[in-house]
């Protein structure tokens, strides 16, 4: 018993030092990213909290299944604690994301798939707590809350499937964070489909020409909030087969890149690069990011188990108080 | 040697929130036996009957019904259980006949209009089957509760305050029901009326 | 207090043959018919739901009238969103009634003691579906007339409305059973239902917009598939979870 306690103490201490290290590394180790400045450091907080939110939701659902199966109050306490801590992380991820988006993308909310998903998740958590507070009988509260939790979990795959179809725009640099994955971009043809859409930006290919070993595309850009049509000229290095000059969209910090050229048929592959793309290709940032993920996971596990213990203790105290009140 | 019918209540406890109203109640009854449960208000008589009928969760303990070698929990034994109680409410916007026809249908009992009329006659509601329950007096409502409970010939009949709001003819009806139930199975009566203690082969006094 | 009673009397009881359990679908149908009959007599849900739908559509047409004349490219999606919002909020006012009524009139115990949980669930689901289909029909007809909506592909719109209604009922019937046991019922129904309905709404609105814009059936097949999958998943989950909700 005392061995376990000592182990617990050591783990807590380690977690504290680890998290402190991450906070320091977030500002001292992670380099500034071109175009983002200090705002880019937020990925060390934002991304881990966001993914812990989904971990918390899953943990809570698993505890709810166990509760309905075995009807032990400890399982219900686990489900509530995971949901509460998840709600905290969910709020942190949302607020940090909105702040970052406002600084970098010029708008705090864009109905990006991830924003949609996390908003619905916030609403589900809120509904779960509202339901619990509306049920007086303890056993019934546990049982019905577990049912709701599971029922909500059943709709999550649909939400994850549907959210990307809501708005095609992904401000989140989804493809950029994990190396090797790739966003598709769109092919436009001078003699065919000249107009296309990337996110909420409408692109129209005006012309394409070769200048030395560079291919230069003339692209007309229309976007919400922009009064006039802008024309950008991204370039592509034919020898190396890589994008060269990547102009910025007016008023926003996205870059337009040519990722492929087919000069014979007058076709170009256009894609949008969000700032933050390639952030993790820096190894210092990458390792701090990974350490932060582990740290936040540890923080989550510690917090929810602590909360579950407190909930159980409260319950037992309530019972004991009543027992003392009974006449001898 | 398996008994044709047994009701086993094992160490049942009932709680409201953190308040315990009933603890450590155990008994076993066989076909033909009648148990009268008495006790002060709030001693848990009604709760015990509700637990036996699977209408309330026991904080502790189990209720099992053994019938022809099969073992049922109350929630699986809907066809074996009948319940009459002041907090048994039927559909006020339907007529008595519509109520009975509905409960017969969900129980899968095939019965004609005439069968239901006969059942209403039996509980003293002959000719009133077409009235909406909203127009029923409390005594008539209590009579209809008997029709509801006896519709499927339950082998375990739980009667909570069986003669409440009844006149002399109503009391006679209860006597008839209890004596007929003796031939069919088990009866449990929760009451504070000393005159009803005579129904019981056994008396269980709660809260002592 | 440890009362023990055990009997030694060997009563030769002639226990009558216990009736077997009712066939599931027949019992569910009986619950449905009972609810319809009650509803036709009291009109609790019917009045609320239809008046709510009519007021919403009238309020929209008061504010939106001129929009139909302008040639806005986004018009179909705006109209589809408005139609579904009107249906959704009218549904929130009425679909909980079937279960809440049983708890408020305290008839739930009588039902619990007579019918199998699954039969109760299926009966109430069927009742909610009938109520919702009536609501959807009335709302849509009013909406099309009062807002002068030109529906390009009425068949596809009808199919989407039907599929959306099935999904809506599959999601909200279990929630209605849950909130019927809670102390504050009205607001809680919408609060609990909305987050679960978000995927359904998005798909239904997008598909309906395509139908209003007059695109072909191929533009709505994806939406119909998602709605069907959503309905099946939530219906199956409800069947598993309802016993836990219905137990006392």
Image (cartoon, coloured by chain):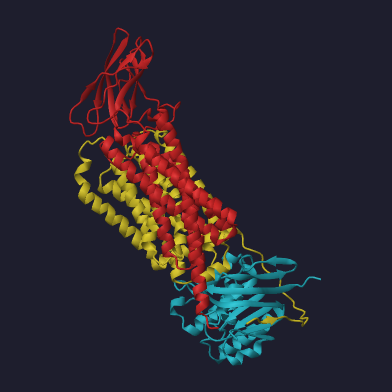
Chain colours: A red, B cyan, C yellow
Residue for point 33% across, 26% down: A272
x, y percent for residue C104: 43, 70
Residue for point 20% across, 40% down: C69
> In which quarter of the view is residue B159 placed?
bottom right
User: Going by the image, does C81 lie left or right of A15?
Assistant: left
User: Going by the image, does A188 lie left or right of A2?
Assistant: left
x, y percent for residue A88: 39, 51
Q: Image height check: is B12 above or below A226? A: below
x, y percent for residue C231: 48, 47
The answer to whether residue C126 of the structure is visible from this angle is: no
Residue for point 55% across, 53% down: A6
x, y percent for residue C56: 28, 54
Nearest the viewer among B11 and B139 is B11
Residue for point 65% across, 75% down: B156
The answer to whether residue B64 of the structure is visible from this angle is: yes
Which residue is at the far top? Answer: A212
Q: Image height check: is B91 above or below A200? A: below
> In which quarter of the view is residue A187 placed?
top left
């Amino acid at each position: 018993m005392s061995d376990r306690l000592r182990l617990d103490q050591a783990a807590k201490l380690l977690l504290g030092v680890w998290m402190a290290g991450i906070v320091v590394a977030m500002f001292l180790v992670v380099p500034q990213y071109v175009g983002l400045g200090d705002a880019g450091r937020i990925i060390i907080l934002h991304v881990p909290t966001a993914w812990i939110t989904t971990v918390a939701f899953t943990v809570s659902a698993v505890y709810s299944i166990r509760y309905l199966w075995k009807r032990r109050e400890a399982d219900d306490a686990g489900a509530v604690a995971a949901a509460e801590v998840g709600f905290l992380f969910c709020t942190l991820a949302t607020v940090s994301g909105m702040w970052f988006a406002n600084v970098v993308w010029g708008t705090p909310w864009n109905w990006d798939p991830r924003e949609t998903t996390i908003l619905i998740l916030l609403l589900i958590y809120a509904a779960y707590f509202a339901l619990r507070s509306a049920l007086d009988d303890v056993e019934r509260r546990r049982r019905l809350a577990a049912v709701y939790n599971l029922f909500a979990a059943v709709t999550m795959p649909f939400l994850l499937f549907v959210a990307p179809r809501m708005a095609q725009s992904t401000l989140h640099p989804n493809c950029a964070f994990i190396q090797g994955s790739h966003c598709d971009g769109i092919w436009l043809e001078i003699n065919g489909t000249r107009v296309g859409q990337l996110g909420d930006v409408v692109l129209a290919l005006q012309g394409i020409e070769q200048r030395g070993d560079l291919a230069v595309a003339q692209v007309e850009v229309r976007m919400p909030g922009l009064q006039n049509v802008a024309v950008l000229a991204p370039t592509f290095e034919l020898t190396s087969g890589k994008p060269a000059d990547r102009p910025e969209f007016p008023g926003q910090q996205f870059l337009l890149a040519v990722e492929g050229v087919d000069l014979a048929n007058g076709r170009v592959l256009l894609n949008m690069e969000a700032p933050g793309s390639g952030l993790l290709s820096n190894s210092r940032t990458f390792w701090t990011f990974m350490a932060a993920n582990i740290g936040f996971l540890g923080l989550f596990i510690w917090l929810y188990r602590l909360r579950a213990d407190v909930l159980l203790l409260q319950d037992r105290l309530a019972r004991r108080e009543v027992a003392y009140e009974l006449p001898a | 040697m398996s008994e044709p019918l047994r009701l086993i209540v094992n160490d049942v406890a009932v709680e409201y929130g953190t308040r315990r109203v009933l603890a450590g109640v155990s008994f076993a009854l066989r076909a033909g036996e009648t148990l009268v449960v008495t006790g002060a208000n709030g001693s848990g008589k009604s709760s015990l009957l509700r637990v036996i009928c699977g209408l309330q969760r026991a904080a502790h303990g189990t209720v099992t019904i053994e019938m022809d070698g099969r073992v049922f929990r109350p929630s699986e034994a809907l066809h074996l259980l009948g319940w009459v109680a002041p907090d048994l409410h039927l559909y006020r916007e339907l007529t008595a006949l519509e109520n009975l026809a509905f409960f017969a249908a969900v129980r899968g009992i095939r019965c004609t209009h005439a069968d239901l009329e006969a059942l209403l006659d039996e509980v003293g509601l002959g000719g009133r089957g077409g009235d909406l329950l909203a127009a029923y007096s409390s005594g008539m409502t209590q009579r209809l509760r008997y029709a509801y409970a006896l519709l499927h010939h339950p082998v375990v009949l739980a009667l909570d305050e069986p003669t409440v709001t009844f006149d002399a003819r109503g009391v006679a009806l209860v006597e008839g029901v209890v004596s007929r139930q003796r031939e069919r199975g088990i009866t449990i009566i929760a009451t504070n009326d000393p005159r009803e203690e005579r129904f019981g082969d056994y008396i269980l006094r709660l809260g002592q | 207090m440890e009362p023990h009673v055990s009997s030694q009397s060997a009563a030769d009881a002639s226990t009558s043959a216990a009736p077997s359990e009712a066939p599931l679908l027949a019992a569910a149908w009986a619950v449905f018919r009972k609810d319809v009959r009650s509803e036709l007599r009291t009109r609790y849900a019917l009045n609320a739901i239809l008046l709510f739908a009519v007021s919403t559509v009238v309020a929209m047409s008061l504010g939106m009238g001129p929009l139909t004349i302008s040639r806005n490219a986004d018009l179909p999606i705006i109209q589809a969103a408005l139609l579904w919002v009107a249906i959704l909020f009218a549904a929130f006012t009425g679909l909980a009634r079937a279960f809440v009524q049983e708890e408020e009139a305290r008839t739930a115990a009588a039902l619990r003691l007579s019918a199998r949980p699954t039969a109760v669930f299926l009966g109430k689901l069927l009742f909610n579906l009938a109520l919702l289909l009536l609501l959807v029909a009335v709302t849509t007809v009013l909406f099309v007339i009062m807002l002068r909506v030109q529906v390009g592909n009425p068949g596809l719109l009808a199919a989407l409305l039907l599929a959306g209604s099935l999904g809506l009922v599959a999601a909200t019937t279990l929630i209605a059973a849950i909130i019927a046991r809670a102390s504050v019922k009205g607001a809680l129904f919408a609060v609990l239902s909305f987050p679960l309905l978000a995927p359904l709404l998005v798909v239904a609105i997008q598909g309906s917009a395509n139908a209003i814009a007059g695109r072909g059936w191929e533009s709505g097949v994806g939406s119909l598939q998602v709605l069907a999958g959503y309905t099946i998943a939530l219906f199956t989950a409800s069947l598993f979870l309802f016993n836990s909700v219905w137990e006392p």
